[in-house]
Image (cartoon, rainbow, N blue to C red):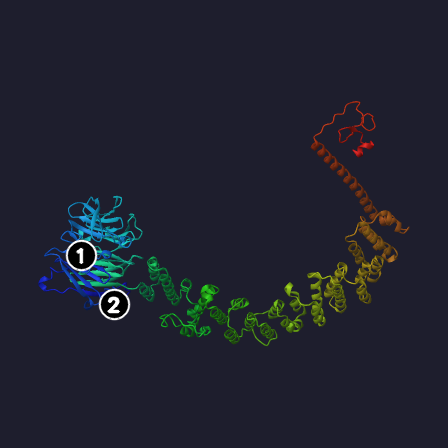
Amino acid sequence: MAFRAFTHTHVYEKQSATKEKDKSSIQCIEYYDRNVYIGTKDATVLHLILPSGTDGDPSVGQSKIRECRVRKLGSSTQVAQLRVIPIFNHLLVLWDRSVMALNMFSLEPVPALKKIPHVHLFEVCNSLLEAQAACVEMVTSSSRRKLIRIHVVGVDRWDVVREVPLLQDPVALAVDGACVCVGTSDRYLLYDVRTGSSEELFPHNHSRQRVIVTSMGRGEFLLNGPESLGMFVMKTGICQRPPLQWPQEVLAAGVCFPYSVTLQPEVLSVYSMVDQQCKQTVSLSGAIGLLCTSDGVLVFTERDIFSLRLVPLKEQIQALVSDERVEEALLLLDGVQGHRPLDSYKELQKEITCLAGFVHFYQEGFSEARDLFITGELDPREIIRLYPEIQSCLSEEFQSQLDQVNKGRDLQLLCRENRSTFHHYLAFLGDFLRAVRGTEQGLECSKEVDCALLGLYTELGDTENLQQLLAFPNECRLDHCAPVLEQHSRYFALGSLYQSHGNHIDAIKTWVKIADGLHKDLSRSDVYGHIVWALSQLQDKDAVWKFADWTLQKNQEIGVQIFNKRPPDDRFDTQDVLALMEKYPLALVLYLEFLIHDLNSEEERLHNRLALAYITQSLSEEEESVLRKTRGKLQQLLWESKFYDVSTVYERVELATLHIEKAILLGRTGGHFQALQVLVHQEGDLQAAEAYCCRAAQGRDTQFRQTLLLTLLQIYLSSEDHRSAAVDLLNNNPRVLAAEKVIQLLPDFWSVQLVSQFLVGSLRETVHQRRMAKLQKALGQVELMRHRVIWMQASKTKFRLDKGQKCKVCQRDLTEPQFACNLTGELMHTGCPGFSSS
């Protein structure tokens, strides 16, 4: 069915005898409310009234129109123009080159308003009818002189208030406020009746019958321009709309927004002012003129009147959308925005935008459809209901506001016959629902949106998006979504669903079954790790205790994180955790390390327990690398911790073969000699003995380290087997050991050559230290002198020392270059007692 902007109806046919046909033909018409006025060729004015049930709609049948009054003006001369002034009940008639006023209802002449003679054309300024109720302006063009007159029309008078001279006689004119647009035989002009200024628009080459000037209101005129162009000209002289390309033989033109209409001898054409395209043509044989109203157009021939009723804009736009002329529909909708009430426009815009979105949707223009659905604020449930496998998430209360009959594809059929194409529709659904989720558009039906997304991700196997949906707060209904996940073996997601609804125990149980192999779900590889993380964040401590044993039995090293990784303000009682971990030695060690190293606990019992746990672990460990790592942790704890009980740990170490640890404990009590004895003779590790000296001396002065090394030297010299070790000790520490103390310990039979390397190194170190001390002293003196110079320069005080000047204290002559000055400015020797006091 072709698009129609207007509906065409025959509303009136004039009945007359054949011999009177030419004399009584229609020449002009006027229309207001339910009143239709006809001016005929034989100087007659007819008043027709439409029935009240039509609400002013002239699109009614001929039998329903009532002829109310007839006024015969004279014996000859046609009625040229009719105009109504409703606020005064005046009907103005141009007849016999005169303007007269009749009563709109009785057609009787208005006695107070005498005829205005010698008038060729006239127009009433309709834009002032509402703004100025006391009077109305009227413009007339003289039939004798090249001028126009401005009249002020009232209830019982009309007066000429201004005359504006013209260069040429008007052929057509239109009025809008203070602006008059005039068409002459070869050009169009604008006149400002207030200021008298004029502006030439453009020339034309039309015959007098083709010169057209029509007021559109809002300070704009429609003109029949050159080259068959319909020109829209503002009263400022500029064009804000593109011109219309219309036929050459245009008899009349008018505007019924958003369309302009042109009349030709056999056809009426309708053009859109939005996109300048011809939208409709109506065949009208013998038409001679038209009259535009607020909601349509009246077209008349010599005997008939036809009504073109404007189809409601909503129906027009819907028709364009139905014909899949989406862009055209949206363009029309945008074009009429400023001419409709705001609320009405918004609702219409939403509805039409959504309809346009469905056209793109069924054409697989998914990106455009999504944007249109969002702009039109479409209820997401309207889309969800189209998908057969997902629509079950909709509640029974939902009632679609869209037509059930849809000429697009049947998605249920498409789902069965073309799964690949249907997959694109599923992808669109996810894209659209993600876009509206969390917005005002989606919050009104958040449960349906989240349930639909869950079903969609499950159907598509989109594990990442499914887990992201369930990992954050959501509105998925448990009764609907749980069976969907179970049906598709999405047990990990099922646990996440339980967790998001606060059913933590059910969530952990579901994941435990996956970890134990009771449920098959390949969507998540590290289920055990997720369980540990979930338990570490869970505030329900009863649930954590319920699964703590299972977690530690699976993996002590990872399972202990349910206690170690908890938030600082939600940790368990330490004693309860330690009691649980009696059965899990590795977890116990890791938990104690967490308490001591991470939480910086200073409790002696915890430090003792960790040290004893390390000892027990060392004794039971068979793998060398692991044993070395454990003993390293134990030794570090014994060296660094200040909070364990040395005697308690020593009792356990003494029974074992942990000599290095025993030495560390002896050293903690000050028994460094015994400690070195253990390392040298029991452990037999000379490097460990020397390292002990370095570690024990950390944070102490050099003298203490020298004492430890001398003690170790004595132990080496007491045994013939360790003489080479003694030499190595000397050679490795020449800067620490003083030669004079070492020589006292060396056996008499040792040759100088044996210890020459040590002696040379020690001597060099001694000389170096002395020279460094002198250098430091010299640098100190230089720095002192520099400060004195700066002080002297800053004081800016001069002292004069003359020959024979005496010291203030001893009264001897000042002969040395060094002298001092007391606070009163008196000079003295620097060695005199008064110098220090001054």
Image quadrant for the N terminus?
bottom left
Task: Point out the residue furthest to the left here.
Answer: 19
222 sits left or right of 370 in the view: left
How much space separates mark 1 and mark 2, taking CA atoms?
27 Å
In the foreground, 639 or 355: 355
Relative image position of residue 18 (x, y in whole percent): 9, 64
510 sits left or right of 403 in the view: right
348 sits left or right of 40 in the view: right
Identify the element where label 1 is drawn: strand
- Above or below for 474 versus 90: below
Quarter where residue 385 is shown:
bottom left
Which is nearer the N-term, disc 1 or disc 2? 2
Question: Mark 1 sits on what residue?
Answer: 102
Relative image position of residue 164 (x, y in whole percent): 22, 44
In the foreground, 240 or 226: 240
Relative image position of residue 641 (x, y in whole percent): 75, 60
Q: Contact, CB < 8 Å: mark 1 with mark 2?
A: no
Image quadrant for the C terminus?
top right
The three-letter amino acid code for the residue at tag 2 is Gly
Question: Mark 2 sits on what residue?
Answer: 53
Q: Categorize mark 1 by other alpha carbons within 10 Å: few (<14), some (14-19), many (20+).
A: many
The three-letter amino acid code for the residue at tag 1 is Leu
Relative image position of residue 467 (x, y in whole percent): 54, 68
